Image (cartoon, rainbow, N blue to C red):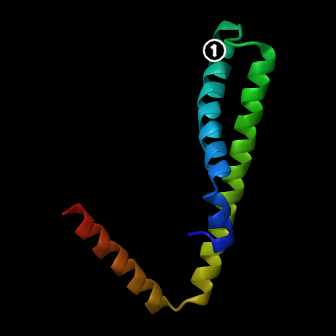
């Protein structure tokens, strides 16, 4: 659940490419860090490792910001709607999931 403007930005092609590259860099960066901790040698050159870790850090910051936006948007949504409307949406969601599983 995201605001429409954030959802639009989140679905841009360049943003999607960044998310894929960021995910890959997190995995490669994790492997590089673990390898360095246990063997004290680098898998790639020092500059390439810095680039990978920088992209992973940017991706982590992006995901953190999106998570905070989702959290605040959900809290705002819950405050503005009545409890009966929320219960109705939860029931609809459960019923839709039951139908999808069949």
| Front-lying residue, 80 or 66 | 66
Q: Determine whether, in the image, residue 65 is placed left or right of residue 82.
A: right
Question: Residue drawn at (36%, 74%), measured in percent from left and top?
Answer: 93
The residue wearing badge 1 is 35
Pointer 1: residues within 10 angstroms few (<14), some, or many (20+)?
some
Asked whether residue 3 appears in the rendered view, the answer is no
Q: Is residue 21 above or below residue 3?
A: above
Q: Determine whether, in the image, residue 18 is placed left or right of residue 85.
A: right
Give the farthest residue toward the left. Answer: 102
Q: Toward which corner of the image does residue 50 lie, by quadrant?
A: top right
Asked whether residue 72 appears in the rendered view, the answer is yes
Question: Residue drawn at (48%, 89%), measured in percent from left and top?
Answer: 83
Q: Quadrant of the C terminus?
A: bottom left
Q: Is residue 96 above or below residue 57?
A: below
Q: Quadrant of the N terminus?
A: bottom right
Question: Residue drawn at (61%, 49%), measured in percent from left and top?
Answer: 16
Give the farthest residue toward the front. Answer: 13
Where's residue 79, x and y in %? 61, 85
| Front-lying residue, 73 or 39 | 73
Question: Residue drawn at (74%, 21%), measured in percent from left and top?
Answer: 49
| Front-lying residue, 93 or 9 | 9
Q: Is residue 46 above or below residue 69?
A: above
Where's residue 87, x and y in %? 41, 84
């Amino acid at each position: 659940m995201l605001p429409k403007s954030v959802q639009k930005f989140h679905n841009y092609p360049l943003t999607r490419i960044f998310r894929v590259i960021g995910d890959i860099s997190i995995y490669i960066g994790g492997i590089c860090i673990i390898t360095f901790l246990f063997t004290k040698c680098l898998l790639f050159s020092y500059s390439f490792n810095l680039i990978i870790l920088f992209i992973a850090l940017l991706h982590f910051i992006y995901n953190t910001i999106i998570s905070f936006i989702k959290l605040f948007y959900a809290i705002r949504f819950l405050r503005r709607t009545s409890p009966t409307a929320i219960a109705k949406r939860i029931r609809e969601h459960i019923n839709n999931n039951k139908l999808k599983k069949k």
